[in-house]
Image: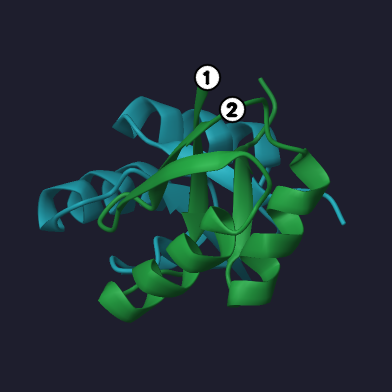
Chain colours: A green, B cyan
Amino acid sequence: MTSEIFTVSGMTCQHCVASVTEEVAALPGVRQVAIDLPTGSVTVVAERRLDAMALRQAIDEAGYELMVPVGR
Amino acid sequence: MTSEIFTVSGMTCQHCVASVTEEVAALPGVRQVAIDLPTGSVTVVAERRLDAMALRQAIDEAGYELMVPVGR
């Protein structure tokens, strides 16, 4: 089991949270999704590492954006 | 005059907004900073395009992260 944390931008309310949760939860192997609305932080517990492309597409489909810190 | 919009993660309250505003406003050429807390969206009006590295450092100094969408 793996746990990953990433940031999604654009979520402003519990409807946004529900949409993203639903899309991410539908990805193969995902067991649990927890979203912190104020920070946009999304924690996913899954059977294996998520496919980054599939994850981005799922977030996209919900109408939001998967974000990464600007390179350092 | 240019206007740029970018995303900052981790802001949860008006103190966060004030810290980021202060750091970004101190960058050379910046005239105006407007932050939308729920989305983390930061709009900057400046005399010229911001230096990306200086911008990232300013956000960093305030204790937050400058984010970009995952490549598409």
In depth, the one of A34 and B37 nearer the eye is A34
Q: Quadrant of residue B59?
A: top left
**x and y percentages locating residue A22 in the rendered image:** 49, 67
Q: Quadrant of residue B58?
A: top left
Q: Tell me which amino acid carries mark 2.
A: Glu
Crowding near the residue tagged with mark 1, few <14, some 14–19, many ≥20 C-alpha atoms within 10 Å? few
Q: Tell me which amino acid carries mark 1.
A: Met
Residue A6 relative to residue A33: left or right:
right
What residue lies at 66% left-to-right and 20% top-to-bottom? A72
What residue lies at 13% left-to-right and 58% top-to-bottom? B14
Which mark is on residue A47? 2
Disc 2 chain ID: A
Disc 1 chain ID: A
For marks 2 and 1 on the same chain, the one whose residue lies earlier in the sequence: 1
Residue B39 relative to residue B27: left or right:
left
The image shows a total of numbered marks equal to 2
In depth, the one of A14 and A45 nearer the eye is A45
**x and y percentages locating residue A30 in the rendered image:** 55, 42
**Going by the picture, which residue comes out furthest to the right?**
B72
Per the image, label 1 sits on a secondary structure element best described as: loop
Mark 2 in CB contact with mark 1 (< 8 angstroms):
yes
In depth, the one of B45 and A43 nearer the eye is A43
**x and y percentages locating residue A52 in the rendered image:** 76, 40
Where B46 falls versus B12 (above or below)? below
Where A2 falls versus A24 (above or below)? above
Q: Is residue B65 visible?
A: yes
Between the residue at mark 2 and the residue at mark 1, the CA separation in whole angstroms equals 4 Å
Residue holding disc 1: A1
What residue lies at 58% left-to-right and 69% top-to-bottom? A64
